[in-house]
Amino acid sequence: MLVFQNQWLCLPLTHSLFSKLLPRTKHAATVLSPRLCPVWCHSVARATTLPTSPGGAEQVVDSSFDAPKVKLLKQKMELLGINLEKSCLPGKYHNLFCPKCKGGQLKERSLSFHIISDCEFAMWRCFRAQCGWAGQVSADDKELYSGVCTNANLYRQLAEESLGLEPLGPEVVAYFGERLISEKTLSRNAVRQLSNNKTVIAFTYKQNGLLVGCKYRTMEKRFWQGKGADKILYGIDDISQASEIIIVEGEIDKLSLEEAGFQNCVSVPVGAPEKVSSKDLPPIEKDTAFRYLWNCKEYLDKAVRIILATDNDPPGQALAEELARRLGRERCWRVLWPKKDEFSSFKDANEVLKYMGADALKKLVENAEPYANAN
Ligand SMILES: [Zn+2]
């Protein structure tokens, strides 16, 4: 699958996501009645009213990061009562004290806090079941939003509804059914459809359970994406504890591997390059085409074995090579797609699933060859 950047339309994600969490929206007004969810609240502040404290974030932030943005995020978080102490290094997860529940009786550091690598926004969630405070703040938006809800599922539902997403209807389920992707797999991966155009599939990009982006696909295979979806690997939470991972070239291939028994799989968000670059690897901060990889470095560093299952065409092979040269060839393996007939080979994981079945796909992954041998 070859996808060109310029085919994608950009939709603002972060702003619309949390603006809809405010009680003034129609939906929230009905859901957030005191009886149903008494602990919802929100905060709104203008960036222009933020105090400007001298010193601050720059001292603790690597110079390759956007220090002014981090400083602004830090100030916004302080207004919400989140004290970042020295914990504002972008791209890392930090466990902080939750200002809402104060960590309960055990005084746990229950608030997982994260500034994404390019410093565009910060997000957090309290993992104490009784609290569940979660939110997201953008360095660009003038306003900031947060929501508090004891029910993580309700939070998730609100975030998805604010993007105009709804659970899959029969038409899309049938479309995936033809590709042997089950409803169970679709549900676990929170695949949705647009509520105002029920033939548009929405692949939700989540990190730490929070919606951070969305990529859309029509049944005619036209793609576009909302802000955020090009920043991380699809399914990143599925590899947070994995020492062996699989990387594929599209969301449907990830779902296909799940049918073959592999959840430890992520997809690249942006398809494949046309060919391998003849240049040396750029420094990380200039490696924009593979930013999603560096944004997930913390996850990928844990992997001792990385199985590349990209498409069986020149762009797919170029993608495998570009990934291997960044991840280190010595820990990469490569799935070799079998011949379909005398003249052609299977092109990707979903095609193998469809025509050869889940067991055959599983065997192909298990028989992946060391990357160095496969080339
Ligand atoms: Zn809390």
Image (tube, rainbow, N blue to C red):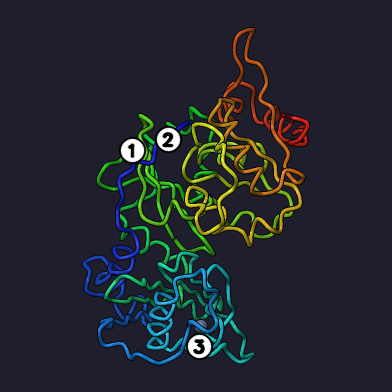
Amino acid under label 2? Val
**Location of residue 96 (image quadrant):** bottom right
Residue 297 at least partly seen:
yes
Which residue carries the number 1 mark? 7
Q: Nearer the viewer, residue 2 or 19?
A: 2
Q: Is mark 3 within 8 Å of ligand 1?
A: yes
Q: Nearer the viewer, residue 348 or 171?
A: 348
Locate residue 142, reporting x and y percent. 27, 75
C-beta proximity under 8 Å, tags 1 and 3? no
C-beta proximity under 8 Å, tags 2 and 1? yes
Q: Nearer the viewer, residue 359 or 311?
A: 311
Which residue carries the number 2 mark? 3
Q: Outermost residue toward the top?
A: 342
Give the structural element (helix, strand or loop) at label 1.
helix
Residue 316 tag number: none
- Total numbered circles: 3
Locate residue 2, reporting x and y percent. 46, 32
Which residue carries the number 3 mark? 101
Q: From mark 1 to mark 3, how far is it between C-alphas?
A: 45 Å
